[in-house]
Image (spheres, rainbow, N blue to C red):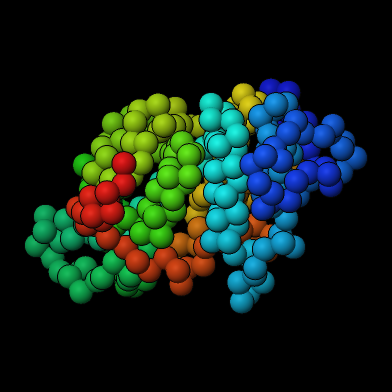
Amino acid sequence: MRITRRPRPLIDSPSAPAPDAPASTLASPAPPNRGSVVRPGLLAPSLPVGAGPAWHVRAADLPRLPDGRVDARAHCARVLEHIQRVRRAHPSHPCAVVFDLDNTLFDTRARTLYALRRFDAEHGTAHFAGLSVDDVGWSGKETCGRLGLDPELTARVHELWDRVFWSGDAFAQDLVMLPLFELAWAAKEAGAEVRYLTGRIDDLAAASLEQLVQAGLPDARPECLFCKPSLETRTGPFKAEKLAEWMDAGHFVGWFATDNRAEVEDVLALGAANRYAFPVVHVEHALQRPGVVANDVPAFPEADLGRRATPTETRALHALTRRQ
């Protein structure tokens, strides 16, 4: 599937100022180098003429994790430094960072555990009494498989899980991933608008917005939350199209953070096919679906994501640090 709009040409110019160049060096971008090879996920979208330089972060310039992947912490720090320079030189230019929700900002395993315990409560059983958040899988079905429960029971559990997990009311059970919460606020303080791009459907928009508000996340406003229209809408193309729409409008998009490996592949492939270099960051949540993410895609390793908190605790953190 191709993105239908005509893409903006990407600029990959060796004459662009270095990432640590002062704001006074900001200038109109050099002409596009149309013969250059674009590596999706590494090249930030160019700013329009008059709004700043062609700018990118190369994997070779960034620290690597022990397994060879690009360190997303270093990548995002470099992006935020650039956003600060752009905002100083061009205060009105739109800069944004983008986050997925499920298992990127919010750990959904607590929601699954809530649904499973509800099954026990409704049926007078204790199948899931000893489980912790770290014991559950992607779904009721997968968790039952881990426990070796029989197929008939698994089917009944999964039916209730599916109904409860996507009810909207259960979103309050999710735990906030603190490293991503802190990154969202760091981006806001650097001058970026924080946007939320999710595969949840429009019918869940109100509950999703309330979840953002209760967690104390920045820019928790309807205009910053983007849900797909329906379950029939494919998530990867929907997100790629939205990213392309913003880049077509000249917005500087610092990153799109998501946990889903297949989605990373889908979004990057759609971008590459249309000459977009979508700046994807992979959040390596413990619940990893199949897929292969290239080492040059910046990654938050699972080991860094163990800090989680309830929405009440994150609101307290927000108040304690007096972030506005």
Position in image of residue 16 (x %, y %): 78, 44
Q: Which residue is at the front of the view, 157 or 212?
A: 212
Q: Relative to 229, is 23 above or below?
A: below
Query: Does residue 97 show up?
Result: yes
Q: Relative to 322, is 196 above or below?
A: above
Q: Quadrant of residue 25?
A: top right
Q: Relative to 194, is 146 above or below?
A: below
Q: Which residue is at the front of the view, 274 or 96?
A: 96
Determine the residue located farthest toward the front in the rendered image. Answer: 24
Residue at 46% x, 72% y is 303
Determine the residue located farthest toward the bottom in the rendered image. Answer: 66
Residue at 28% x, 45% y is 216
Q: What is the number of callouts on the image?
A: 0
Q: Is residue 196 left or right of residue 90?
A: left
Q: Is residue 287 left or right of residue 313?
A: right
Q: Relative to 264, is 120 above or below?
A: below
Residue at 68% x, 34% y is 52
Determine the residue located farthest toward the right in the rendered image. Answer: 35
- Indicate the quadrant containing the C terminus: top left, top right, bottom left or bottom right: top left
Query: Does residue 239 show up?
Result: no
Position in image of residue 3 (x %, y %): 67, 29
Residue at 56% x, 54% y is 76
Q: Which residue is at the front of the view, 54 or 178?
A: 54
- Indicate the quadrant containing the N terminus: top left, top right, bottom left or bottom right: top right
Position in image of residue 32 (x %, y %): 84, 34
Position in image of residue 161 (x %, y %): 28, 51
Q: Quadrant of residue 305?
A: bottom left
